[in-house]
Image: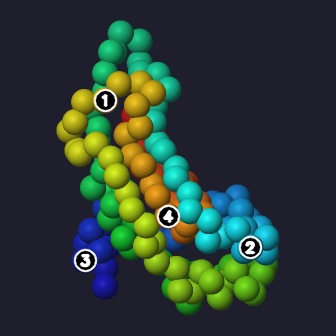
Amino acid sequence: MNAADLGLPVEVPSTALFTDRYELTMLQAALRAGTADRRSVFEVFTRRLPEGRRYGVVAGTGRVLDAVENFRFDSAVLDFMAEQKIVDEPTLEWLADYRFRGDIWGYPEGEVYFPGSPIMRVEGTFAEAVLLETVILSILCLLYT
């Protein structure tokens, strides 16, 4: 399967590499503490708009949904993470079966929004949702700067 088959704009071995180490550390801590399965909600919003703008237009929703749908930790990524000692073995085992099973709500592509209003809402377990924070913000923030 190639990037075009996955609906991705560039060739990448895994969209899971679009998270960062902090999110993986948070996951590991939640698994250890027994809080990984707690229901959580994350919202994406903009605090302010460029000077002279009263509203923005939502862009990037499709890219976010494609990235989330294809967010997987394949054996090559897991092997790399094990070699680099990024997370412990129980976390690697959990990541091997990772699939986001929560819900994503938000404004449709092209909709007008105002500063402070949630553009996107991610609902799921803490463990599932926290891993998506970086990829979602990196796609949406790039488009809104």
Quarter assignment of residue 57: top left
| Residue marked by disc 1 | 113
Real-space Cα separation, disc 4 to disc 2, in angstroms: 16 Å
Residue 87 in percent (x, y) is at 75, 76
| Residue marked by disc 2 | 34
Q: In this view, does 9 lie above or below 101?
A: above
**Which amino acid lies under the numbered mark 4 shown in the image of this protein?**
Gly
Q: In front: mark 2 or mark 3? A: 2
Instruction: Say the numbered circle drawn on residue 46.
Output: none
Secondary structure of residue under mark 3: helix
| Identity of the residue drawn at 46% across and 42% down | 44
Disc on the earlier residue, 4 or 3: 3
Real-space Cα separation, disc 4 to disc 3, in angstroms: 27 Å
Q: In this view, does 98 lie above or below 65?
A: below
Instruction: Say the numbered circle drawn on residue 124.
Output: 4
Residue 101 in percent (x, y) is at 43, 73
Q: In this view, does 44 lie to the left or right of 127?
A: left
Disc on the earlier residue, 4 or 2: 2
User: Is the C terminus in the top left, top right, bottom left or bottom right quadrant?
Assistant: top left
Secondary structure of residue under mark 4: strand
Q: In this view, does 58 lie above or below 13?
A: above
Quarter assignment of residue 67: bottom left
Real-space Cα separation, disc 2 to disc 1, in angstroms: 37 Å
**Which amino acid lies under the numbered mark 3 shown in the image of this protein?**
Asp
Q: Is residue 118 above or below residue 133?
A: above
Whether residue 18 appears in this view of the structure is: no
**Which amino acid lies under the numbered mark 1 shown in the image of this protein?**
Tyr
Real-space Cα separation, disc 4 to disc 1, in angstroms: 24 Å
| Identity of the residue drawn at 35% across and 25% down | 114
Disc on the earlier residue, 4 or 1: 1
Disc on the earlier residue, 2 or 3: 3
